[in-house]
Image: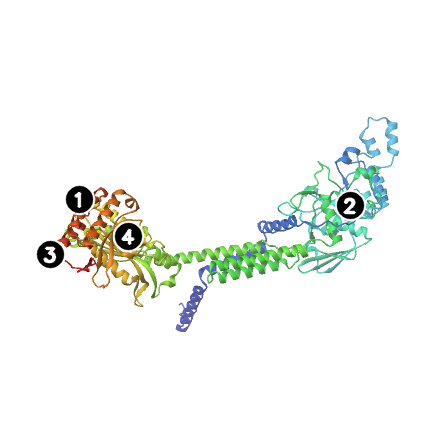
Amino acid sequence: MAKQRPPGAAQGMGRGEAMLGAMLRRIGPGRLAGAALLAVILVLRVADPPTVSGLRNAAFDFYQQVKPRDPSPVPVTILDIDDPSIEEFGQWPWPRNRVAEMVSKTAAAGAVAIAFDIVFAEPDRLSPDEVARDNPALPEEVRARLRTLPDNDALLAHAMRQTRVVLGQTSVRSARSNRTDKVEMRAVPHAIMGADPTPFLPRFPDVVRNLDILEEAAAGRGVFSVRPDPDGIYRRVPMVMLVQDTLRLGLSPELLRVATGDNAFALRSNEAGIDGVVLGGKMIRTGPDGSVWTYLTPSLPGRYVSAGDVLADRVAPGRLAGQLVLVGTSAIGLEDFRPTPLGVPMAGVEIHAQLLENILTDTLLNRPNYAVAVELMTVLVLSALVIVLVPVIGARLIIALAVVLLGGYSGLSYYLFQEMRILLDPTWPVLGTVLTLMLMSSANYLREERQKQQIRGAFGQYVSPDLVARLQENPEALTLGGERRELTVLFSDVRGFTTLAEGYRDDPPGLTALMNSFLTVLSRAILREGGTIDKFMGDAVMAFWNAPLDAPDHAAAACRAALAMHADVATLNAERARAAVEADDKALPINVGIGLNTGDCVVGNMGSDTRFDYTALGDAVNLASRLEGQSKTYGLGIILGSATARAVEGRFAMIELNLLRVKGKMEPERIFGLLGDEVMRGRSEFAELEATNAEMRAAYSAQKWNVAEAALDRLEAAGKPLDLELSGYAALYRQRLETLRVAPPGEGWNGVHVATDK
């Protein structure tokens, strides 16, 4: 039977889950994703795959290319078996007696010690005895004479015993070269200070040795094998390594040991790996694997002395005196060139020479054991700052902060290289932080987009896209309150809506569809010109310009919208008429009247704490509503207030209509009729119409009724070339003229007409 959880335990678990849920919501999914990415970045750095190490090494290479090491005069010389030497003394390999001569002459010139970046693994085929054995066709007396001559390898061994010579050895390159019966390695006396270093050292199961006679004659033996990094670049050289479980020095440190007369070297290590090698009383700091980072100069001709010049006694006196000499080759075809951090290949022997220079001048690059910890801590701290701050501070500030912090860290990395030769990775901490920043910024963007979508869904069907955009950018704006701004306000209404609606008394859905189409046409015209639709009131629309976004030329935008509304409604009427003909029906046209006025208003969120609208209030709004009502009276589609007319004067086709005192206002308002756009304004026919209207208005104000009436006749005719229907406007004034003839207004009349309806 299953055990039942006690009620208290269930409640406790419920509270715990609720607390966990609340904590996760407070943290947010973006921060959780950022923390997960940070964990991946840290794991990748610890694993250090080739991509990560490659970025780091490329940065260190760039540092050396920007600031290569300044060459210093040190006693290191390369005895170069170069192309001129081979051309003069024959192809390589030379007979060992010639090599012996080169060793003897180098020692006689004062060289302290000589190291070969060459292996003499096979007997010299040019030794007299070998020549006699390989040429049986020679006369017997010649062969017998050859057998009595000294062996070339013996001559080289003899020359080596007269000075300090270090022979080079190299690691085997294939499993087949790894001998089953290995020759025991000659151990070099050494001391170990600290923990066992062998787990950290590079291992070579076997090496290619020199002939025994030469190995016995040499003062030292050094391994010149250098492993490149995964990208093929030679950046590090091992100072010490394991060969057949025996500690051996590399070629350059072995040369230094022999030259200083040391019989032994010391290895200092700790639990983290190798710390350094002591040679000639000098502590040489190394990486955990016992390797060092070389700090290179470009290849310098001054490092080289041609082997041919030594053999031909052409070397300047004193040139080799006191020198540590490395024998190698730069000849074409001998393939001893290695890619370097400087971006150009370099002879392998010169890499060994530069390592020796680094040791003697204390210019090795230092990649300390604590570097990885510093890099991990840097990416952890910087990425954590990004995760914490990005959701709560602005994008500009976080970008500025990231530039300062990441730029500062990168600058510190280069400073440490330039001034202290310390290698601190500038790439992974920066890349890791940038990746975290990109993720957090994307999470922020998605969160803001989700919030904007919610606002768009809640308000997009009822207010203008501009207002929606503003609310999306600043949701805090959804609070009560307003601001004082100059607006251009538009009111529109359908003329004869009652009659129109009667035609649909048996088809209410048809009336709804018609009004939706009609209001859509009006809305699009308003929104195209950047207007804000305040509200729909049945068949009426209220809109305004210059809020919530600034519209410097808002009066002109409103005029263009009003003209477009009339044009689009005309198109809609034409489409309805065609559809009615096809259906053998009749369609009453929709006529719309529009009033526009400009003035100071209060605009903002008006209402209660529970329900409010973004709207405009003020006298300018009321006047715009009254002007819309006058469009029917004056028989024109669009009526402008004086402020709107002044704002667009000279740019639209408009005529002055009257000095009107609307209902509810004491001061009269000069009103205008908007007839067309800039194109109509520029036509000569409109100029004639405008002049005729001005003549009629002047005669009307001067109480010259007959003159005014004659002008009205011409005014109607002047509108026809412009496709303007002015009969309603002319009829209104004819009616007023009849009234004024019967009851003249008397002296002092200023032409003001008092409106009796809204």
Q: Position of residue 442 (x, y in %)?
A: 46, 55
Q: Nearer the viewer, mark 4 or mark 1?
A: 4
Q: Residue 77, labelled with which disc?
A: 2
Query: Foreground residue, 473 or 146?
Result: 473
Whether tag 4 and tag 1 are in contact, CB under 8 A, the answer is: no
| Number of dots carrying numbers | 4
Residue annotated with mark 4 = 523
Mark 4 touching mark 2, by CB under 8 A? Answer: no
Q: CA distance from mark 4 to mark 2?
A: 88 Å
Q: Position of residue 66 (x, y in %)?
A: 64, 49
* Label whose residue precedes the other's in the sequence (2 or 3): 2
Q: Of circles 1 and 3, which is in front?
A: 3
Amino acid at dot 3: Val
The residue singled out by tag 3 in the image is: 742
Residue extending furthest bottom? 8
Q: 463 or 441, which lies in front?
A: 463
> Does 569 sit left or right of 189 as displayed?
left
Q: Earlier in the sequence, mark 2 or mark 1?
A: 2
Horizontally, is 169 left or right of 532 in the view?
A: right
Q: Which residue is outermost to the left?
A: 742
